[in-house]
Amino acid sequence: MHQTGGCETCRREYEQAKEPGRAEEKTDAAPLLKLRKKMAAKKIQTVLLTAVFVAALLVSAFAVLDAPIYLPYSEGLVAAEPVGDGGLRITFGEEVTECDYTIYPDPEGGSFYYCDVQAWTSLWDRWLSDRSGKLSCMVSPSEPYPVKAVYVPNDGSETVCFYGDTDYEGSIVLPRLSLGYYLFLAAAALAGTAVVWLLTKKNAGLRVWVERVGLYPAAYIVSHCIVSGFGTTSYSLPRDFFLIVFLSLLLYGGLLLAYGIWRLRQEMKEINQ
């Protein structure tokens, strides 16, 4: 009885398979299911792509608005007064919104300290900040020695000693050049991947990976232009380099998602055909 039931079941399925449209329905189900999965993946990648590029746009806006605008030395820009045993209070004019200083012993072995002072503002502070009052900072050397306070304008002009012994010869602080080296390496990497891409015409799988790798140096070059413009020098190297790397990673993620969406579209076209 069991064998007969099994034969009847098989016969029934055979008869159904012979009905018009049944075979075609089974044949078309797999490509349709594959197409639906790719469409769902495309929607998810599109949402992620939008989020990544919005984040990149916000970081780019921050990099431009928060970029330091170093102020040239002028009367009233910066002043100092002694505090306690060897300490120093440095105050700035109202146009200064950010400052920094570096204190170090005399390189020639004298019994005093140098204090290099920098002051700047930014577009954010000029346009959007509601800060009021004058900025100030305290300088406390490790030993109670006299301090020579030196203003560093970071604009190609000489430094100015505004407190302490006036027997001081100004010098020019040069910008850092490292960003130019990194930009050159990114351009060389992009050119190298372009050459490899041209040599891998017959290997589609390898060419896909070359394209994915080549997107990062392109993202780094774009990030450099956003953060530092077309210049290759910087007076604030740690800040600029961190922003460039962070923004390049965001852009790279966005480019990878855009590349994935483009490949999905190509595959969907092939399925539809």
Image (spheres, rainbow, N blue to C red):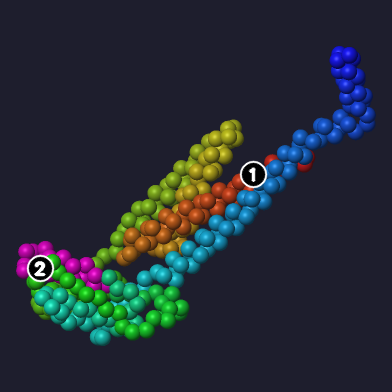
Residue under the image location 27 percent in, 70 percent down: 100
Bounds of the magenta span? 101-118
Residue 202 found in image quarter: top right
Where, quadrant-wise, is the N terminus in this rendering?
top right
Q: Tell me, yes or no, whether the highlighted magenta stretch contains residue 148.
A: no
Residue 241 found in image quarter: bottom left
Q: Is residue 149 visible?
A: yes
Give the residue type that dot 1 points to. Arg
Residue closest to the eye, 173 or 194: 173
**Seen from this angle, which residue lies furthest front?**
1
Residue named by callout 1:
263
Residue under the image location 27 percent in, 81 percent down: 92
Could you say which disc has been placed on residue 143 in the image? 2
Measured from the top left, where is residue 39 in percent x and y? 70, 47
Measured from the top left, where is residue 88 in percent x and y? 17, 77
Residue closest to the eye, 266 or 170: 266
Give the residue type that dot 2 points to. Glu
Within 10 Å of disc 2 (Cα), the crowding (few <14, some 14-19, many 20+) is few
Q: Earlier in the sequence, mark 2 or mark 1?
A: 2
Residue closest to the eye, 251 or 171: 251
Separation of marks 2 and 1 at Cα, in angstroms: 65 Å
Tell me if residue 12 comes above or below residue 227 in the rendering.
above
**CB atoms at circles 2 and 1 under 8 Å apart?**
no
Q: Secondary structure at mark 1?
A: helix
